[in-house]
Image: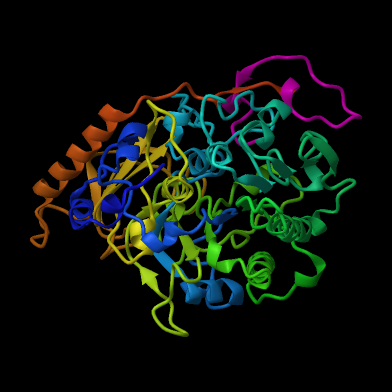
């Protein structure tokens, strides 16, 4: 899309940005008109050709897992340097607290309830829900959704996904059917350990549409991450040498920090944190390889790199009991630092993520050796809006988006975002508005589904900026706050949001073992669709 210089630089636009509540989604028409929610952008950042884009999306990484975020025993020198040369976010949130819905929102700029990548509560005694796309999941990211890869293609970008997809198991729903020119990775994830292969379908390594081999069989799982990293380095070199000088979009999604943990031999035992620390330090090394490749090709001033993760750390101590051979070690997952909860919860530890922006000459540290830090509110869905703005792509008409551009934050201005809506399945669990967060429902804390889903009427309220650990409820007795006014403002934002949301049909309710990628030596079972949570919900 074309932004006028007035829209980019006008003082009036800047003032409007400070006033916008951000309580509803933004339509394609509004986005294109720049109604105060889509930018200004630094004129220097758009004067040159559209930048290359590298998005590094880790798996199950906690807010406190990097040394630049304060971890005492995990060393991440490359991410530390990235933060020193770029911008570190302290209040960056993923769109959902678990893999599939989070990734769907990242690539579409839309909440899972809008794009369909969610499951519904089954209202049984256990009141469980399907949270991720199972290996026998029938659903997939609908082709009616427009991914950022598809939009970037319209303005000349070449794109590749390396690593975890998890938005469609079957070939007709792989990344190359959703706008990516190339794909090297797994349709789901790297799968369970070998001990569960008798009941678990193959986890296949795919090159575009061809099966390279099966993980734990032809493919040594301990070589997978270095394989991904080398593939990323080769892709950047190849695209940099493109005689047509087309910009590229690399979506790098390694999953070695997801259970079952694995690392390359050279990183085994290097971290005082144990195996999980080994995995994070290898991830950090991979980031370093990518950034050093960009530097060596002298394309750093026209390459925008962003690092974050899909959801909080895996703190579930019971899931491992259903996977033979996986040690039930509560320390095997990451750390949310001071934040409460973790993966699959809408407590801060489940949805707040480490995030670092790097673009030399455009996003700068305060001074040499210092880490520029922003406390502004941001979401993973904002990356979609940012990439659209930087590339000049045009959004499809009649579609509502949930992201806003990060360019004001990256250029030293205030965030356009003042609210966040935390969904699990088809339930709106919590609302963040300014510094306050109201939980209408809670489920889970340190363990999976423990305690069970609880409704809160009135909602439990926290001042997240003063109490990021969510330990102290704000009550009517707290004279520091006017709880009536605060809840009135939050409920207004919530009601506006709910009125704006058109909930799509759920894609993750139905399973059928016949659609899974079965091993060649096992017979494919007959088709028999069933509720994914009947098997039970976490067995696959």
Q: Which residues are magenta?
A: 514-540
- Name the spot of residue 445 as percent of width and height, x first: 44, 51
Q: Is 91 above or below relative to 78?
A: above
Q: In the figure, is residue 517 to the left or right of 291?
A: right
- Name the spot of residue 12 as percent of width and height, x first: 17, 53
Q: Residue at x 71, y 57 (%)?
A: 232
Residue 530 lies in the magenta-colored region: yes
Q: Residue at x 55, y 76 (%)?
A: 81
Q: Residue at x 32, y 48 (%)?
A: 4
- Name the spot of residue 491 as percent of width and height, x first: 19, 39
Q: In the figure, is residue 261 to the left or right of 439?
A: right
Q: Is 25 above or below relative to 94?
A: above
Front residue of this view, candidates 531 and 61: 61
Q: In the figure, is residue 6 to the left or right of 443?
A: left
| Quadrant into which the C terminus falls | top right
Q: Residue at x 63, y 68 (%)?
A: 291
Front residue of this view, candidates 125 and 144: 144
- Name the spot of residue 448 as percent of width and height, x first: 52, 46
Q: Is 265 above or below relative to 116?
A: below
| Quadrant into which the N terminus falls | top left
Residue 467 lies in the magenta-colored region: no
Report if residue 474 is visible in the image.
Answer: yes
Identify the colour scheme used.
rainbow
């Amino acid at each position: 899309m074309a932004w006028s210089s007035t829209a980019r630089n006008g003082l009036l636009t800047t003032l409007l940005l400070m006033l916008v509540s951000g309580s509803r989604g933004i339509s394609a028409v509004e986005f294109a008109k720049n109604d105060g929610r889509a930018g200004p952008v630094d004129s220097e950042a758009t004067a040159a050709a559209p930048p290359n884009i590298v998005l590094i999306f880790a798996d199950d990484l906690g807010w406190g897992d990097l040394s630049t975020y304060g971890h005492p025993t995990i060393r991440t020198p490359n991410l530390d340097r990235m933060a020193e040369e770029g911008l570190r976010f302290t209040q960056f949130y993923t769109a959902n607290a678990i893999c599939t819905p989070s990734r769907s929102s990242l690539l579409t700029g839309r909440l899972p309830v809008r794009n369909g990548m969610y499951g519904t509560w089954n209202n049984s005694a256990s009141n469980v829900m399907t949270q991720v796309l199972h290996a026998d999941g029938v659903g997939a990211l609908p082709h009616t959704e427009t991914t950022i890869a598809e939009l970037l293609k319209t303005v000349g970008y070449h794109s590749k996904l390396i690593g975890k997809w998890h938005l469609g198991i079957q070939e007709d729903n792989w990344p190359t059917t959703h706008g990516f020119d190339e794909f090297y990775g797994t349709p789901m994830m790297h799968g369970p350990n070998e001990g569960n292969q008798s009941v678990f379908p193959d986890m296949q390594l795919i090159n575009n549409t061809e099966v390279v081999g099966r993980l734990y069989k032809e493919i040594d799982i301990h070589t997978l991450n270095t394989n991904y990293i080398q593939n990323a380095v080769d892709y950047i070199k190849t695209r940099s040498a493109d005689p047509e000088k087309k910009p590229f979009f690399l979506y790098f999604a390694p999953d070695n920090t997801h259970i079952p943990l694995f690392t390359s031999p050279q990183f085994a035992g290097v971290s005082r944190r144990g195996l999980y620390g080994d995995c994070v330090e290898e991830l950090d090394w991979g980031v370093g390889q990518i950034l050093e490749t960009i530097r060596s090709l002298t394309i750093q001033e026209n390459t925008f790199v962003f690092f974050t993760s899909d959801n909080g750390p895996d703190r579930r101590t019971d899931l491992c009991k259903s996977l033979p051979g996986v040690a039930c070690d509560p320390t095997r997952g990451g750390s949310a630092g001071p934040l409460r909860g973790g993966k699959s919860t809408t407590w801060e530890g489940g949805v707040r993520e480490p995030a670092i922006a790097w673009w030399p000459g455009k996003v700068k540290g305060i001074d040499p050796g210092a880490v520029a830090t922003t406390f502004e509110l941001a979401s993973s869905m904002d990356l979609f809006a940012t990439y659209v703005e930087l590339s000049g792509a045009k959004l499809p008409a009649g579609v509502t988006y949930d992201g806003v551009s990060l360019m004001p934050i990256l250029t030293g201005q205030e965030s356009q975002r003042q609210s966040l809506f935390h969904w699990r399945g088809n339930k709106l669990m919590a609302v963040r508005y300014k510094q306050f967060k109201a939980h209408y429902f809670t489920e889970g804390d340190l363990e999976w589904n423990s305690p069970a889903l609880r409704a809160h009427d009135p909602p439990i309220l926290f001042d997240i900026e003063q109490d990021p650990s969510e330990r102290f409820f704000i009550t009517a007795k707290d004279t520091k706050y006017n709880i009536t006014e605060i809840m009135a403002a939050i409920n207004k934002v919530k009601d506006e949001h709910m009125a704006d949301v058109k909930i799509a049909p759920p894609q993750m309710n139905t399973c059928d073992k016949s659609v899974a990628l079965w091993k060649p030596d096992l017979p494919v079972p007959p088709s028999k669709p069933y509720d994914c949570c009947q098997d039970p919900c976490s067995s696959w």
